[in-house]
Every structure is written in C-alpha cells, then in structure tokens.
Image (cartoon, rainbow, N blue to C red):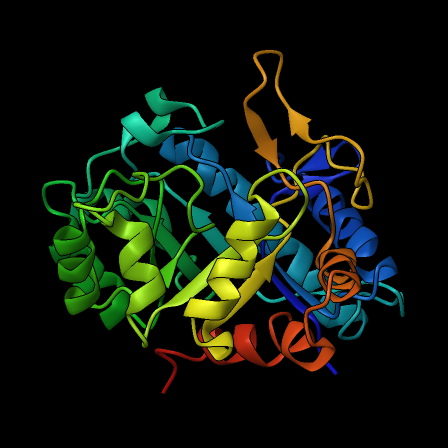
C-alpha cells in the first residue's frame, strides 16, 4: 500500500530551502524510514528566483532517483513525486509561520515566471482565493493539470465557493492559517467541510487541531476526501507527541509527526484503522490525479 505525504517541507535539520538535491534526497530518506512511499516536497514562498532554485533541487533529486531506481537506490527512501508550491499567492493577513513579505499577487505573469520549465513537477499550488485575480489564476493552474488548493486565506464561504467554481479542489491544512469558523460566516473552513467535492488536508499531530476538531472533521466530512499531511519542517523530529514545533514567539511552524505516526495516534484514539489509512494512501493518490488526463 503506497503511503503518500503531499505536504512536507523537511525534517531533522533539512528542508526545501536549498539548492542541494541531496538534501531533498535525505528528506525522502527520512520519510521512507517511517514507511512513507512517496512525498511532495513543499516549497516555501520566497523571491521567484529562490523558489526556482528550490524547485530545481527537487527536480534534480527526482532525476537522481529515476537513474538509480524508483527509490534512489535506497529501499527505505520515499519516491519524490513533484512539488507542492505553498504560495506565493497567499494572504499576508494569514501568513502563519510563513514570511508575508515573500507573498505575491496572483498574476499570470508571476505564475509563468515561477514555474516555466518546472510544469512537469508542480502538482499542487496553494492560493488564497479571495485575492484580486485569484479566480483567473486558479482556472489557469487547473487548465495546466495542476491541483489548486486554497489556503493561507481570509476567504469567506462565498469566496471559497468561487475559488472552487474556478477549479480549486483542495484546502491546505484546514483550520490553520485561515479565517476562523463563525456561526454567521463559516468561511473557507466551513466550505471545506461541507462541499463534498473538496479534499481537505489535516495536520493530525496533537498541536495544530484540538482532538474534538479532528473528531468533528471526520464526523462531518466524507472520509474519502480527508488527507492527513505532516506539514513537517526543518525543526520537526517526526515522532514527537510531547512538544509542538514553534518559533520563538510560540507560532506553530510545522507538524511534529510523520503521517504514519499521525495515523497511529488517531487509531489509538478510536478512529477506524481502514478509514485512517485511506487518508494517507487512497485519498492523496486520488487527489493528485484530479486534473491528470
């Protein structure tokens, strides 16, 4: 059974803010040691030149794996399936641990400059649908066979719905770095829970979501549309249930668990094992195939 993590920045002192493909391969090794079959390294928002350097490192790492065999010559290494661009078309008011000064307006020329030459490896782009020009860019991204995911967003329910109508099919780490749910304005999180066609990423460590919120997600949302992600970062130890990964100000920077450990934790808390496993196998595979012909 192929276990897939569609949102990881790094772990154990390594991350995708690098031009070294061997750092990316080492990240794949870490995930592979935890039983993960495939990953999408997530690229941080930065100057376009820097993001392209980071994507180039991932692409070279993929080529090294392909030359050496599907797992880079190491049977414990995760296969690198492409990249998830977490930005730069995000709302500065919901930057979370990302640097708002690196965000860009959702203009087609920015997208073209960013991904030219990397169209074959970009699988997901996170974008805030309420920004001016976002709906047009979401259509462009979807037309390219790339999955637009909505996140780092102040979108209302209606704005999220317009993003969906333009082609967005995912919500990046639901409830985190987005407008809060309110009984008179359920916002993007409410839309993600209620729209049956939208996939939602869930960071299922003990820190990003209260356990009751995770329970709510699984009670309201079709489990076939839930994707558990690590959202791991350089500082993540990948198996730490005792301490969240935060910056000096206490802002959560990334997940503390790999996806297999996150699933084990949820099963221990009573979630059906088959449902939980689908969230890191069948569901992400189907999600990545959304716009593939």
188 or 237: nearer the viewer: 188
105 or 251: nearer the viewer: 251
Horizontal relation, residue 131 to residue 72: left or right: left
68 lies above or below 207: below
Residue 280, x across and y down, in percent: 64, 70
The quadrant of the image that shows the N terminus is: bottom right
For the point 21% across and 59% down, the residue is: 138
The quadrant of the image that shows the C terminus is: bottom left
139 lies above or below 27: below
Is residue 8 visible in the rendered image? The answer is: no
Horizontal relation, residue 178 to residue 184: left or right: right
Which residue is most to the top? 248
Residue 238, x across and y down, in percent: 78, 45
129 lies above or below 38: above
Is residue 94 visible in the rendered image? The answer is: yes
Horizontal relation, residue 124 to residue 89: left or right: right
Residue 275, x across and y down, in percent: 63, 78
226 lies above or below 155: below
284 or 271: nearer the viewer: 271
């Amino acid at each position: 059974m192929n276990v897939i993590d569609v949102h990881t920045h790094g772990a154990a002192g390594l991350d995708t803010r690098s031009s070294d493909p061997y750092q990316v391969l080492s990240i794949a090794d870490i995930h592979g040691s935890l039983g993960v079959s495939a990953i999408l390294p997530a690229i941080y928002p930065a100057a376009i030149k820097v993001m392209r350097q980071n994507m180039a490192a991932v692409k070279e790492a993929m080529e090294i794996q392909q030359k050496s065999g599907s797992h880079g010559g190491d049977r414990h290494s995760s296969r690198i399936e492409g990249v998830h661009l977490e930005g730069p078309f995000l709302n500065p008011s919901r930057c979370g641990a990302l640097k708002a000064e690196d965000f860009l307006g959702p203009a087609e020329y920015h997208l073209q400059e960013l991904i030219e030459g990397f169209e074959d490896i970009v699988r997901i782009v996170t974008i805030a649908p309420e920004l001016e020009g976002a709906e047009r860019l979401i259509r462009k991204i979807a037309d390219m066979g790339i999955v637009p995911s909505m996140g780092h967003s102040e979108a209302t329910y209606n704005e999220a719905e317009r993003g969906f109508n333009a082609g967005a099919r995912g919500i990046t780490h639901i409830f985190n770095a987005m407008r809060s749910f309110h009984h008179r304005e359920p916002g993007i999180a409410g839309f993600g829970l209620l729209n049956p066609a939208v996939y939602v990423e869930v960071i299922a460590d003990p820190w990003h979501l209260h356990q009751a919120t995770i329970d709510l997600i699984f009670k309201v949302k079709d489990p076939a549309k839930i994707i558990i992600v690590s959202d791991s970062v350089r500082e993540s130890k990948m198996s730490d249930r005792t301490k969240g990964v935060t910056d000096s100000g206490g802002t959560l920077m990334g997940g503390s668990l790999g996806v297999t450990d996150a699933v084990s934790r949820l099963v221990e808390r009573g979630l059906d094992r088959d449902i939980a496993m689908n969230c890191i196998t069948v569901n992400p595979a189907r999600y990545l195939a959304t716009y593939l012909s």
